[in-house]
Image: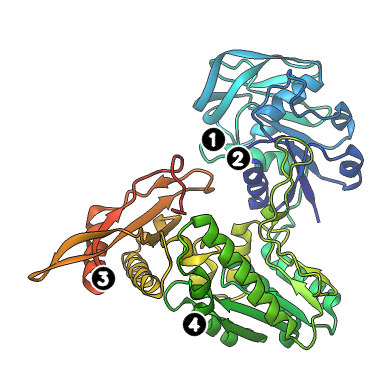
């Protein structure tokens, strides 16, 4: 399989670059800038992309790399900081720019360059830099400019090294996707062998070979990642797979039943559902601190899950829905700081497996969803919105009680039902209800009420690093509010959260 290396120098778009490469049917993997050149050399990459980053290359405490990489004979594309790094390594001149460029900037391309095949001479690109290349290195030709950036792109045709000061990976760059395509196919001469159908067939074959006649246990949360992992494993080994689903009573309305019905009807596997809502409520009684709630829910989930695993007659392998972002080491900061592997589960000392299986560890979330669709998993599950590990426990502010869970489940169901009916759910990255532990005075019929307020949260975002509150039309909000107050007992007021991220977060706790 052809591979492109995305060498991470701390840029916020490192994953986005890899995803854009994969969109062009070429597999990309991300490694930190601390990766030894010997490791890069032995992996036979078709091309290398240097990411952006927040630092200045002339600051020697910034991320750098050995100049040997420019002589590997592998095509290189530098982006933003990566562009300046190539200039620095080639003994060009990088300085603080007289005029910084941020946002959409008009770019003039040299149409003779392979990088700009089928790209207009004048187009808009996305800039974000305070330094600039004052003098290109020897052997490089300037192939792009802006009004304030005399070297917005450069190339060394002999060495197949290209560099752009802007960000082609973001949608704001008008022809950015075409430029990446040109690098992959015109410069690196890729053939495009990264296809989801191939991934499914190859993965199933590997799983069959690895597992043999042994058993596999998977913790199934009902989320996208674990569900797609279950689908792949079921196709590979059928009844050798046991999925353990812990229903802690903090899921959305009827969600536990939906998960059970989906996996028992669609796939050949052993499905074990552990209903333990009362246990969780007893542990959470009187607890109001958000972090303490999270800790209790996480600890009890761990205990319930592993106690059920201990009851299995044979363990075999342990499977996880780990996806690629969970495995990436970050190029930010010191070399020993890595991204938390939040989707990976620690096994107790007394539970021994033959090994760990992670069938999705090469995929990004959007790729996981595409695999799920091809496996026949229902869209409601494949396109399930992000749902916190502690479930509704972090959407109920203050103490969690059975009554509050029911009120929130019903309100959230009305919101989701109404959004699905009018089709507006497709415009939102995430939407849900929150019960803020606030009661207000209301009037229903001829009676005064003093009951719960519910808040609606809805956001739009590409990456969840930042998010904007969704501008849902007033008539839709009015319909949702009317339905909630009429259909859900103990709610007499509905409010809408119009806070972006930052300063707020998407979830309330």
Q: Are marks 2 and 4 in contact (CB under 8 Å)?
A: no
User: Which residue reaches farthest front?
Assistant: 286
Q: Nearer the viewer, residue 455 or 35?
A: 455
Query: Which color mode does the image show?
Result: rainbow
Q: Which mark is residue 359?
A: none
Residue of label 4: 257
Q: Residue at x 66, y 73 (%)?
A: 303
Q: Earlier in the sequence, mark 2 or mark 4?
A: 2
Q: Is residue 204 visible?
A: no
Query: On the rendered structure, is 103 left or right of 307?
Result: left
Residue of label 3: 490
Q: Are marks 1 and 4 in contact (CB under 8 Å)?
A: no
Q: Quadrant of residue 346?
A: bottom right
Residue of label 2: 169
Q: Earlier in the sequence, mark 1 or mark 3?
A: 1
Residue of label 1: 173
């Amino acid at each position: 399989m052809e591979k492109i290396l995305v060498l991470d120098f701390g840029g916020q778009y490192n994953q986005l670059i890899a995803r854009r490469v994969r969109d062009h049917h070429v597999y990309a993997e991300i490694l930190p800038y601390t990766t030894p050149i010997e490791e890069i050399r032995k992996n036979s990459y078709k091309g290398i992309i240097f990411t952006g980053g927040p630092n200045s290359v002339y600051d020697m405490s910034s991320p750098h790399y050995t100049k040997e990489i420019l002589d590997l004979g592998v095509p290189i594309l530098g982006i933003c900081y990566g562009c300046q790094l190539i200039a620095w390594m080639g003994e060009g001149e990088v300085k603080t720019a007289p005029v910084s460029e941020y946002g959409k900037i008009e770019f003039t391309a040299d149409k003779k360059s392979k990088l700009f095949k089928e790209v207009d001479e004048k187009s808009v690109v996305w800039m974000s830099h305070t330094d600039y290349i004052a003098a290109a290195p020897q052997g490089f030709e300037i192939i792009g400019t802006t009004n304030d950036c005399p070297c917005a792109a450069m190339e060394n045709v002999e060495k197949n090294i290209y560099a752009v000061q802007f960000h082609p990976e973001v949608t704001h760059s008008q022809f950015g996707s075409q430029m990446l395509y040109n690098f992959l196919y015109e410069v690196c001469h890729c053939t495009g062998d990264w296809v989801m159908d191939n991934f499914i067939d190859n993965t199933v074959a590997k799983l069959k070979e690895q597992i043999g006649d042994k058993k596999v246990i998977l913790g199934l949360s009902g989320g996208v990642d674990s569900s797609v992992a279950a689908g792949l494993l079921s196709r590979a080994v059928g009844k050798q797979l046991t999925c353990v689903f812990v229903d802690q009573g903090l899921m959305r309305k009827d969600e536990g039943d939906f998960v059970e019905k989906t996996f028992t009807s669609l796939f050949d596997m052993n499905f074990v559902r552990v209903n333990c809502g009362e246990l969780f409520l007893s542990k959470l009684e009187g607890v109001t601190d958000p972090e303490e709630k999270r800790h209790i829910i996480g600890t009890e989930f761990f205990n319930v899950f592993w106690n059920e695993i201990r009851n299995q007659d044979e363990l075999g392998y342990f499977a996880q829905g780990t996806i690629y972002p969970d495995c990436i080491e970050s190029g930010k900061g010191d070399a020993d700081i890595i991204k938390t592997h939040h989707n990976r589960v620690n096994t107790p000392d007394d539970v021994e497996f033959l090994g760990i299986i992670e069938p999705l560890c090469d995929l990004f979330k959007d790729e996981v969803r595409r695999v799920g669709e091809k496996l026949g998993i229902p869209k409601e599950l494949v396109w399930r919105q992000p749902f916190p590990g502690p479930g509704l426990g972090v959407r109920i502010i203050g103490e969690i009680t059975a009554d509050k869970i029911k009120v929130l489940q019903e309100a959230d169901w009305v919101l989701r039902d109404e959004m699905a009916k009018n089709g507006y759910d497709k415009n939102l990255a995430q939407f849900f209800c929150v019960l803020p532990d606030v009661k207000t005075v209301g009037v229903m019929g001829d009676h005064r009420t003093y009951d719960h307020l519910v808040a609606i949260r809805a956001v739009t975002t590409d990456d969840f690093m930042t998010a904007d509150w969704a501008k849902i039309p007033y008539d839709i909000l009015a319909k949702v509010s009317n339905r909630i107050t009429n259909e859900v007992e103990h709610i007499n007021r509905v409010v809408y959260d119009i806070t972006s991220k930052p300063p707020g977060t998407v979830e309330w706790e």
